[in-house]
Amino acid sequence: MREIHCDQITAAVRECVLKANVELPPDIREALNQAYNREDSSRARQILKILLTNAEMAEEKKMAICQDTGLVAVNIDMGQEVHVVGGDINQAVNEGVRQGYRDGYFRKSVVSDPLQRINSGDNTPAIIHYQLLPGDHFNITVLPKGAGSENMGQLTMLKPAQGLDGMRDFVVRVVKEAGANACPPLIVGVGIGGNMEMAAYLAKKALLRPVDERHHRADLAVLESELLEAINRLGFGPQGMGGQTSALAVNIETYPTHIACLPVAVSLGCHATRRSSCTL
């Protein structure tokens, strides 16, 4: 049995929060570079250059990539042979978020109650997901996500007879309706299957996969590419000002479902889809 102290978890979450909010992941930066090089629209190229410059300045100056430093989702993959000691793991995670937002001088955007709307003052609580697996590993990934992109996500419960075409139509329609509101170029996370909450979880989880990594299933990898082409044909482009690059990637995750269900969820990541991981 391997022991991990809550203080270690707090310190790791703090570092992930600080890194995620100021350093654009290398795969996304490279995707923006590639989009800049292939764009025909001078306006789109100018906007992409601004986004790249913004990312460089944020990392150099250790300042937030975006003023909306988001609500933090924390994904923990935990081996069943790990024993967490020294306190409550949820409190440890939230303390790491609290310290990271304090020390990074990031905007605190969380309200303690969705109806009373009183700011919690420290960007907690986070949304915490645990996955228990064999072994003694402990991996943490944080995803701070702003409201501009989060508000544009949608979920639908399709009839199985609507099938692949219905799923395609829904995904493209969600992106079209979002347009410039989600700060494109986008990363489009798609969750298919499970039940209502599982589809939404899968769509958000899909945003954690690097944009240059296609699905391990060949048919889903093809579907990701087809959806990306369809979305980029919409033509709203970077920041909705026109161009070839409305999205950088479409990432799909699936799960078994009921014979009478076809849940589909779409979670949109903005041009600054922030994530950071560490292993204890």
Image: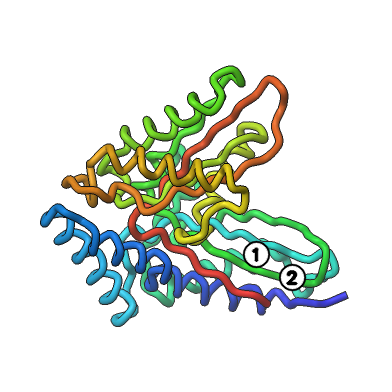
Q: What amino acid is at disc 2?
A: Gly
The residue drawn where x is 50% and y is 32% is 155
The residue drawn where x is 70% and y is 74% is 6
Q: Residue at the far bottom: name it.
A: 60
Q: SS of the residue at dot 2?
A: loop
- Quadrant in which the C terminus is drawn: bottom right
Expressed as whole percent of the image width and height from the top left, the position of residue 135 reads 82, 68
Q: SS of the residue at dot 1?
A: helix
Task: Locate residue 26 relative to residue 15 in the image: left or right.
Answer: left
Disc 1 + disc 2, Cβ < 8 Å: yes
Q: Is residue 194 above or below residue 113?
A: above
- Quadrant in which the N terminus is drawn: bottom right
> Residue 30 is drawn in which quadrant?
bottom left
Q: Would residue 118 be visible to someone looking at this image?
A: no
Task: Locate residue 208 relative to residue 9 in the image: left or right.
Answer: left
Neighbor class of circle 2 (other Cα within 10 Å; few <14, some 14-19, many 20+) is few
Task: Locate residue 119 relative to residue 258 in the image: left or right.
Answer: left
Res 91 label: 1
Q: Residue at the far right: name it.
A: 1
Expressed as whole percent of the image width and height from the top left, the position of residue 167 reads 50, 29
Q: What amino acid is at disc 1?
A: Gln
Name the residue carrying label 2.
87
Front residue of 1/250: it is 250
The residue drawn where x is 28% and y is 39% is 233
Colouring used for the render: rainbow
Expressed as whole percent of the image width and height from the top left, the position of residue 274 reads 43, 62
